[in-house]
Image: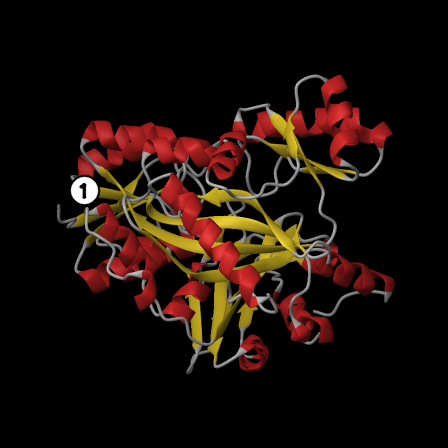
Amino acid sequence: MIIRRILIANRGEIAVRVINSCQRLGIETVLAASEADLGSLAARLADHTVCIGPAKSSESYLSVPAVIAAAKASRVDAIHPGYGFLSENQLLARACDESGIVFIGPTEAQLDAVGDKLKARSHAIAAGLPVVPGGEIGSMEEARALAEEIGWPILIKAVGGGGGRGMKQVHEPEKLTETIEMAIAEAQAAFGDPRVYMERYVDSGRHVEVQVLGDGENVIHLGDRDCSIQRRYQKLVEEAPAPHLRDALRREMQQAAVAFAKHLKYKGLGTVELLVDCRRDTFYFLEMNARIQVEHPVTEAICGLDLVAEQISVAEGRRLRLTQDEVRLSGHAIECRLNAEDWSRDFRPSPGTVTEAVFPAGDGIRVDTHMQEGAQVPPYYDSLLAKLIVHGTDRADAVARMRQALGRCRIGGVTTNLPMHAELLEQREFAAGGFDTGYFPRFLAEKIAAGGFNG
């Protein structure tokens, strides 16, 4: 089929991002917006805007009935869910199918296969991928026995989780019961699913992910990304390709990601997340995100493709445009997430009115944002204001470009983490690349020990 009108069931920069691709493709857009976002940039850019409820996410962006009702009333051909909110929700995929609306994403069965982390582990094993030693937690006695078997420290993870919620480290046996109970409570509150499981905690690991694209029969990868700069499992800086990986290990990881997606007969855009164990020089399967990622622009920069356009093409039932041999990766890209938060006060959110929004432009610079002077940063949603992306001939060039680009950004009216990024990019360890997930916490600890923060 040909998709002529799309409902965008999301907000912020990803809504603007999808609108831009649709305009290039000649596709009409309908934005599904909450009351808090009716005056947003996305609402002004979309061809039509429909209100789907109050500011509270559970009554708007997380409401399947509200989204489906808006789609039917707007007579759209398809729904693009963006990332977050309902992007990996099986109920929305099912409701789309029942309503004769195309869900721009994988099938309901595929969402079920990867949305449940234990099911995803079993599929990874079936596809031949290595997984971190661990397993499901039944009783506390079983948990203690499993912890001793796989070795300390350990990591408790929510089966239905994501974004770091329901994820807890345990370094001491006497803290195990208490930590599991906390993880269960957090998982129930965040996902409505109290199940948790346990894995060995890899204390010197890198978070590397592989972008895959499938049409239900064929699967290709579009390179890898390093997302090791994280705070409490929330990514802050991403880059592509992942620096300082052995060529053989990189190929193994890319082939493993493709094998996993082929095992699922995957249809759409997805990201296979892997943990590189630096001490053992090996990798493990972590999970698959069955949607477009926040950090997709760094992949677009090195492969030259519009990934939203690729999603739409697959959703229309088309075969992949490229074979693996035709994929060309060039240069190095880095993305910094600019958030409305105060890094000097434990990253406290900073809602308010943006009084100034100046972003750099030029060769090799891209800014994905929904922010303009006068824009509101509501307290109800994620604090992401903009994504600053640079592309250089190599990593050193990209780092230099990002330093300059950050220096030309100005955002007023709300406190942002812009000064944090500027300081981070000046660090020798960052310039060297190839750091593990412990690098950013060490950077913060050193800042605190030195007596404070700039900006």
Q: Please tell me which residue lies in front, 343 or 309.
A: 309
At a point 76% along the width and 60% down the height, the residue shown is 444
Q: Please tell me which residue lies in front, 415 or 62.
A: 62
Residue 439 occupies quadrant: bottom right
Q: With 126 as the anchor, is 424 left or right in this view?
A: right
User: In the image, is residue 64 above or below residue 267?
Assistant: above
User: In the image, is residue 28 above or below residue 69?
Assistant: below
Residue 446 occupies quadrant: bottom right
User: In the image, is residue 176 above or below residue 278?
Assistant: above
At a point 43% along the width and 59% down the height, the residue shown is 296
Q: With 184 as the anchor, is 74 left or right in this view?
A: left
- Residue type pointed to by label 1: Val
Q: Is residue 145 visible?
A: yes
Q: With 169 as the anchor, is 393 left or right in this view?
A: left
Report x, y in % for residue 114: 45, 36
- What residue is shown with label 1? 76
- Secondary-structure class at tag 1: loop
Report x, y in % for residue 91: 35, 28
Q: Is residue 294 visible?
A: no
At a point 60% along the width and 29% down the height, the residue shown is 187
At a point 68% along the width and 64% down the height, the residue shown is 435
Quick one: label 1, few (<14), some, or many (20+) residues within 10 Å?
Answer: many
Q: Please tell me which residue lies in front, 33 or 250.
A: 250
Report x, y in % for residue 32: 31, 43
Q: Please tell me which residue lies in front, 213 or 308.
A: 213
Residue extending furthest toward the left: 1
Residue 147 occupies quadrant: top right
Report x, y in % for residue 231: 66, 52
Q: How is the image coloured?
A: secondary structure
- Quarter of the figure that contains the C terminus: bottom right
